[in-house]
Image: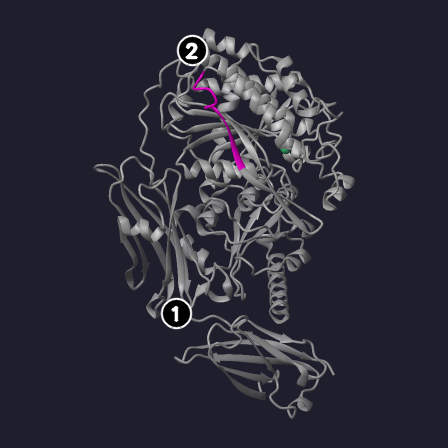
Amino acid sequence: MPTRRTWRHTGVRLSLLALALLLLGEPGAGASASPDSRWIVLFEAPSTHVLHELADNAAFDVRWVESDLVVAEVEQRDLLHPLWGGRVVARRRLDQQLALLHARNLEELRAHAGASKALSTLHAARVAAARAASGEVWILLASPGAWPAEVLGCHGGLVLPKHDVDPRSLIERAPPAALLPWLLAPSRAWTPGEQRLLQAVAPESLAATLDQLTKNTLALDADRHVFSADLGGLYNPRVEEKMQRFVQGIGPPDSLVKRQEFIKTRRCSGAIDTTSTYNVIARLPGSVPGTGTFVVCGHIDATGSNDADWVRARDECRTLSATPGAEDNATGVAALVEGLRCIADGVRRGDVDFAFDLEFVAFSGEEAEGIEGPLTGSEHYVQQRLAAGTKLLGAINLDMVGSDSLGNNLQVVYNPASRWMAEWLVDAASSMDPPIDLTFTPQLDETLASDHNSFWMVNSPALLWADAPVNVLREYASYHRPGDVGLDVSVAKMAEVTRTLLAALLRFNTRAHTEPEILLPAEGVEMFLEIQGAKISYDRRFSRVWPGSPLTALASIYGLGAAYGGPLHVEIWIENSSGRRTVFDCVDDDCYALGGAPRPFPTGGRLDLGVDPIPIQAQDGGTNRLLARVTYERAPGEEVVQTVVDTFVVAEQVGLPVLVRPNPVRDPSSAEIAVQLERPGEVRVEVYNLEGELVATQMQRVQPFFQAQSKIVTLPILASSSAAPQMTSGTYFVRVRWQGPGGQEEAVTSRLVVIR
Ligand SMILES: [Zn+2]
């Protein structure tokens, strides 16, 4: 629909221009920013709690805000006050509602935003800004779809993808309750059994696995690429056989190593080829059933997608050249297999035991590029585990951990919810004697990079261990090329990585000490509330709702998976100046039924209660708070109450978004206005000259369901051609007035310049 596109494009351009002028003209706001360092960046669809979090970060100054919503929030929440105080430098009514925040980094933000795909780019930006050293950036928060990429491109901005991560992963969190006592326990010496285990790491054993993964005995190089039949026919079985051998004697034969099948596709020559492949999972059962599962993983598949010939052959369904994937990621798989060997030996000897189940997983499909996209194997794994009610306590993903040329660095990549894991790792590794010959670099980076992301997607803590930051790895010479044959791989380094893994896991060894007694607060129910205004004016979330227009809300409740399935009560209500009004109320099984959730509720599950639609009434005018409260008993008599709040503003009177075009114009009879309306009514157009004399007037009735999609009404400015000849060169005012069926009225005045 070109009309809509043109409209949006131009409207945004005007607004940004106004914004830029405002900033340039305001000494308080613009003093520290030179014009070439001023950037505008768009974030799509931040919900209010994300906005709070952003504003709460010291790296941002809230400099200028045009959103009534944000103003309302500021008045209501102490959280924003310190940042807000005295910093409103200007207010002007634009036809957009914006929150403009100011941060102190440009380059890193840009690089980060470009790399980050499905994960929280909003948070990524916050992190980048926090690490800022120089530069200036202006961040524009707006809602989805309103700001076309090309417009922001004109202004040096970025359009970041929709924020679709589990909101809980944005927040730093404590370790799972099952691990916390161990992590808080005072440091202790290694037991003799643990020392034996740590010394068992053998470079020759690592080299043997590396060889098995990168050398095909029938051919010269390995053929372990993602579409290769050899992956499932030769290499996965090799790893499986090895794992099988290592865990022998721990449980019933064949019970501990499993294949987990999933579909993979190959797209070539316009056809889609579907086969299946599998993850290989070795499981060491924990001594306390129900504690949860800890995962050590690495991907076994490889790709040649950075090699033009390989890609051409792939796209034409031809035979692909071999991709041994030595560094990426035979190194990670070899380290996890070696880790399993040592731990399993320790378990058999009785030197080590964990309360939780420990799973070593060789994921397939990490490099997949069919219909299903990358990380297929780990996504499948995570979904299966959650569906089975497994609590995923943490995961360590080893991906590219043996490069000699990248030095003895180990990059420890975490997201906010996994920060505790990075701290735990560094702490555990620093206690090694002899010391581990690696430098640990913790890094907060949510870039979509490898299988750990699949855990983050469902808000399970996970780390990526790698030789270097993700952007450096992607520049690695043989990265995703058939030339990744292992010339640069150091087995000595892989041994240090494996020792680190063992040192970290031994922190939870129940044979070394019993679980320290630490009183823990009960894990609370968590709830997030999102207003989803499909019919909110101009489809923008941070916007006004018209009286009579439907508003939907979604309350997502987590953490109901407690042992005791006591009574549950969920209530959602609106509070505004005229009082309180309940819009949703459910008790017990009704709630589960409405949320489509089973009872007992699965651990790690999520109960979504959609409230649709909430009738918006005239007395809701102004700022409204939408509140949701869940009341739940974790155990008999142990009640948990959680309340969340979101805010929306009901429109009373808003200037109409109007565009006059072309402008300037040579022939006034060709000029038209486009006006975007939310509701039918009567539109009146009046043209005045500079002296305030009425030059022309016309009226048009807009019927219900007019141009239902765009809601944009286009009218010629002059009803008849008779007025046009009177309009000499100069500026005119075009007044557009809308009157609704109930007598509501809105008006806006635009300029029209006539050049004869
Ligand atoms: Zn990889």
- Indicate which quadrant contains ligand 1: top right
Work out which quarter of the rendered image holds the C terminus and state it. bottom right
Residue 32 image offset from top left, x and y in percent: 62, 48
- Neighbor class of circle 2 (other Cα within 10 Å; few <14, some 14-19, many 20+) is few
Amino acid at the residue labelled 1: Pro
Disc 2 vs disc 1: which is toward the camera? 2
* Secondary structure of residue under mark 2: loop
Amino acid at the residue labelled 2: Gly
Is residue 260 on the magenta stretch?
Answer: yes
Q: Is residue 234 above or below residue 172?
A: above
Residue picked out by circle 1 = 547
* Secondary structure of residue under mark 1: loop
Q: Would residue 466 be seen by someone viewing this image from the given angle?
A: no
Q: Is residue 726 above or below residue 671?
A: below
Q: Is 304 displayed left or right of 343 in the figure? A: right
Q: Is 95 displayed left or right of 354 in the figure? A: right
Residue picked out by circle 2 = 350
Residue 466 image offset from top left, x and y in percent: 61, 28
Residue stretch rendered in magenta on the structure? 250-261
Picture quarter containing residue 550?
bottom left
Residue at 54% from the left image edge and 65% from the top image edge: 94
